Every structure is written in C-alpha cells, then in structure tokens.
Image (cartoon, helix red, strand yellow):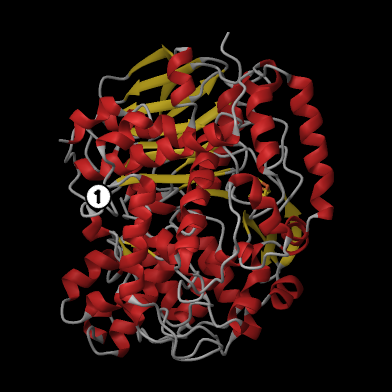
Amino acid sequence: MIYGTTAKILRVDLTSSTIEVEELSEDFFRLYPGGKALAGYILLTEMTAGVDPLGPENVLVLASGLLTGAPVSTTPRYVVSARSPLTMGYGESEAAGFWGPELKMAGFEAIVIKGRAEKPVFLWIKDGEAEIRSAQHLWGRLAAEVQTTIRTELGDEKIRVLQIGPAGEKMVRYAGLTNDLRHFNGRNGMGAVMGSKNLRAVALRGSNRYQKLAYDADRLKRLGRKIAQAVPKTASSWSLQEHGTPVLVEPLSKAGILPTRNFRQGEFDGVDGIKIETYESQALIGRRSCYACAVSCKREVAIDGEPSEYGGPEYETIGAFGSDCGVGDLQSVLKANELCNAYVMDTISTGATIAFAMECFERGLISLEDTGGLELRFGNAEAMLTLVEQIARREGFGDLLAEGSLRAAQKIGGDALRYAIQVKGMELALHDPRGKYNVGLGYAVAEIGADHLVVPHDPSLADPESQTFKDARALGITEAAPSRSLSDVKVQHFYILEKLTSLEKVIGFCFFGPAPRSLILPEEVQEAINAATGWDLSIEEMLQIGERATNLARLFNQREGFSRQDDVLPERMYEPLENGALQGESMSRQEVEHALSVLYRMKGWDEDSGMPTSEKLAQLNLGWAADLVD
Ligand code: SF4
C-alpha cells in the first residue's frame, strides 16, 4: 500500500468507449503526488504541441490532491486541466466542494479523458467501477435540472455530480464546470474542453473514507480538530465564516482598488448598492461549507424573495458584474451570477468581457448595429443580463463575446485591444495590481493567464508586526515590504509564496486554508502531508513539490511557443487610476520588467526566454522533460 493515495487513475477514451485503470508507483507518487503536479505531468507527456484545445486530441484531467478528502479543514480541492481554448496554453482550474473527496472515496486519484464521444454522454463511477451512459436527455438543460435528473435516474440523492452546462456544450471559451451547483472550476475554459468531448457530467459515489489511506489517521484527525478550533480565533477565517468574500467590496473601494468601469477607476460611486450590508439585508438566507471544512465561507441567497438553487455570488462575481460593469444594483448582480451558474460560465471572464464591450461601445468602437440594439453603456444592468444569456447560448452579439475579450478585440479592431484587460487571453480577476504589485506579477507570469490565486495578496506581508507576517517566517520570509513595491525583497516574497500556492494546488488545499493568507501554519501543512503519507518532508522539500508543478506548467507553455513576451500586463495597468484613494497612480513598466528579470533568476529560468534552464530542470528531477520542449 502507498499511504495517502488510492494509487489509481481511471482512463477513459470516449472515441472508443473504453475504460481502463492504471496503477501508480510509489516513485511516481513522490514526484507528482496529485492535483496540479499529476495533471501537468500527464498533459506534458500524453499530448504533443499544437493540438486543437476543442478537438478530440486534447487531454482532460480531473485530479484530486494528495490531501483531498482528509479530515482537515480547507482540503477538498481538485483540479481540472487541459490545453486551454482561452489562452492556448496550459489550462487549469481548481474548485472545492464535495466532488474531489468523493473521487478518492470512489477509489481514484484522477480521471484522464481522451477522445470525443459520438453523442452526448456522462460518466458514472461507483466504488472502483465506471461506465459511460447516454446524456442525450441532459443536453441543453440547465445545471440544476441535470443534477436532479442524474440523481433520480441512478436512485441516489447523495451522488456528487460534476458537470458542464449549456455554455460548455456551446464551447464558450470561458465555460466552466460545477459540482453540487455551488462550487466552480470557473477559469480557463475547461468546460468548453469537456463540452467538445460531448461529455456532460461525471457522477460519483464512493464509500472508502480517506482515513483508510492515511499513514497515521489519528494524528491527521487530531490536527484537523486543532485547526477547526482555530477558525473562530483567526480573524481572516472568522470573517470568511461571518460574511464570506463579499465583505471585501466596500473596503477595496475605499482603498481605491475595486476594479470599476473596466479598471479605469478604483472607487465605485455605486458601492452602497453592492456592499456587504446590502447583500446581507437583501439576499442572504444561509451559510454552507465544503467537505469537512470548519471555515464555512459559502453563502446561500434569495433572489426577488425566492431561494436560489445555486450559491450566492462571491466577491469576484460582485466586482465583475457590479463595479466593473458600473452596476450598483445587487439584484442584477444576483441574477447575472445565477445565470452564469445555471449555464456554467466563469463569472469573472463573463463580467470582464462585458465591461470591455461597454468601454468599446462608449468609445464608439462598436455601435447599436453591432450589439443588436443593446445600449451597452456602463451601468446598464438590463443590457448586461441580456448579454450574459446571449453569450451562454452564443446568440447575437454574445457569440463574439463568447470568444473572450482578446479575440473579440482582435475582431473589433482599432484601439479595442487596449481595452481588453487580460493576460495571455484570460481576463484579470477583480483585484487591481496598481494597489497590490505582487498580484500584478502573478497576473503576468501565471501559466494560465491573469490568475489572482498565485500568491497570498501583498497586504499580508506588509506589516512586520502582523500575525500573517510572523506566520510566514517558517517559509523563509524575513523582511516585510509594502503592497505598492516591486523591490527585490518583494520579488523574493513572490518567489517563495508561489511555491506554497502551487503546492496547495497539488495537495488539495483551498486558498483560504494555509498561512499567511489564512490560518494553517506551514508546519501544520507539513504535518498533514507527513501524517497522510508517512514521509518525513521538510518545509523546503514540501515547497519543492509546488515548484516542480509550476515548472511542468511552464514547460507545457514553452512547448506551445510561449516566452517572456507573453508575461505582460495589460496597457491599462500603466495608466493612472481615474479616481479614489490611488487616483493618478499606475504601475511602472520599467519596474515590472526589472522584477520579472529578478524573479526569473531566482526561479532558475532563463532571463531572456523566461523558461526553465536545464540546471533547474535537473534540480527538480525534471531533466527528462527537456527533450519534450526542444
Ligand atoms: S474555506 Fe470556503 S471555499 Fe475553502 S474549503 Fe472551506 S468552505 Fe470551501
């Protein structure tokens, strides 16, 4: 037995309708122990360069993390990975909820899906057995109906359903996946990849508890209890339980970094309509959690007095459909969120692409004729909601926006590219790097495009007296640095923290788990891994697992022709903010370029190409990969 893992991968070829089970070796598990590392290895070794992301040759990997399903708060995550139809590079999206733990309970670490089914299908997996079933009766239906139908058909209300929606079927380039209707693999268009394979859902049921896999289940349980007890004593975790991520809206507006009207402004004049007090008085009807998590940050809402079948909007969604589209009406934001959840599309890219179109309309780059009569001005909530549906169905003007802001800008022409707020084709999340410089560095270098979950955000290491800074010392961080700095100290923060965040994506931790973002100390992450596996990893060795996973993703992009030239921030980040506490402030192109050079050197990447050197690959036991990218 290899502790901490089922050591099994389910392999499904939809073209030939064949299913196989692969056993993993202990040596392999040591290097690629789950999630991002496992997915990165498979994508790099089982695909060649240049495959069509929406063709049958693309490989879709659904992988739980090493700790996914352990009795430790914030560890239910799994990753969905493939070549991205949005960025054309390494694609990846994580989600929490219940599906990842259930995959392990059903007996598998990961599912690797190849080919394309002739007709719509879904996968049904129960305790080590798998079958491909027809999904023709599910095609075109909204997510809630599909989940109910699958559970009824299979006669079990506890089945965990991971699915795409109609947006994935239509291959909207930022379509996502959802599990339990409330947890989303939103980013990077993984839903479009699954849709291109005619695969609507993967339904699971398993009965093997994680504890049976663990080397020291009692130690893991004791650690889990200790962490759960720390939740009410940790300010950031308690705030997540009390108010969830929507609590960020007003403070970020006051700080001048709430992306507003397509990132032109940092303070939103309509913030009262979407701030936490409005959310809690108008919409909140309950709180929920993910598997075995004591943080319980998920929200339940009612829209126009009716309980929604889907979860309430997170901060990112409120920013995308609220301030970034200039909409200060919570009910409209709730509806946009529900539509995206029902059709299963990324709320960030959907809102940001509409905000981009609004700016193009106001600047005269597109007309009423282009939009089919929609007055696409900032603040027009009705037009925004119409467009969300049009995008999901690829109808009217929505068909162009379903391609994402970069491709839409290329089609619109003129200055439009300037207003597409994206990196590598993926739209920025709702955090303005002009107030958090390391978030900007993350947007620039992340292999998947403008991801906001690359490092804990800058304020956590700005104050040397803060608990968050003290918690980071065990990672090797010794000096604090302000949020609006790209000094070498700041780049070193990035270098260390990126390894930690990447590790989280390998082992299944949610971004709201480990310190310095949250409550679980580096020593506790280390203890959890060692208790699960029986290993004796040091913190440095643990971080190297994360570093290896990042380098695999980087190599994938190198093979697809990416280089330093793709690690660029949108032009807007070098333009001054128009209002708010940071009015007139922008990033400096020179500083960003300097920081990139410093970062590449720290990472052991070539300064000109931005790609891993052979020495770095050898150090990470990835020497074998050099031949694949030549
Ligand atoms: S912190 Fe929130 S999102 Fe993360 S696992 Fe817990 S409940 Fe889920």
Give amino acid for label 1.
Answer: Met
Q: Quadrant of the C terminus?
A: top left
Which x, y percent locates residue 615? 29, 35
- Residue 117 seen from this side: no
Which x, y percent locates residue 552? 34, 37
Q: Quadrant of residue 366?
A: bottom left
Viewer-side residue, 13 vs 33: 33
- Residue 94 seen from this side: yes
Q: Secondary structure at mark 1?
A: loop
Q: Is residue 398 above or below residue 271?
A: above
Q: Residue at x 31, y 20 (%)?
A: 17
Viewer-side residue, 16 vs 137: 16
Q: Is residue 483 above or below residue 211?
A: below
Which x, y percent locates residue 115? 26, 29
Q: Is residue 354 above or below residue 586?
A: above
Which residue occupies the extreme top position in the image? 1
Q: Residue at x 68, y 62 (%)?
A: 301
Q: Residue at x 44, y 83 (%)?
A: 261
Q: Quadrant of the N terminus?
A: top right
Q: Quadrant of residue 190?
A: top left
User: Is 75 situated left or right of 498 in this image?
Assistant: right
Q: Quadrant of residue 113?
A: top left
Q: Residues within 10 Å of mark 1 (few under 14, many from 20)?
A: many
User: Is 465 situated left or right of 262 in this image?
Assistant: right
Viewer-side residue, 590 vs 101: 590
Q: Is residue 364 above or below residue 168?
A: below
Q: Residue at x 41, y 82 (%)?
A: 586
Q: Which residue is mark 1?
A: 88
Which x, y percent locates residue 627? 18, 29
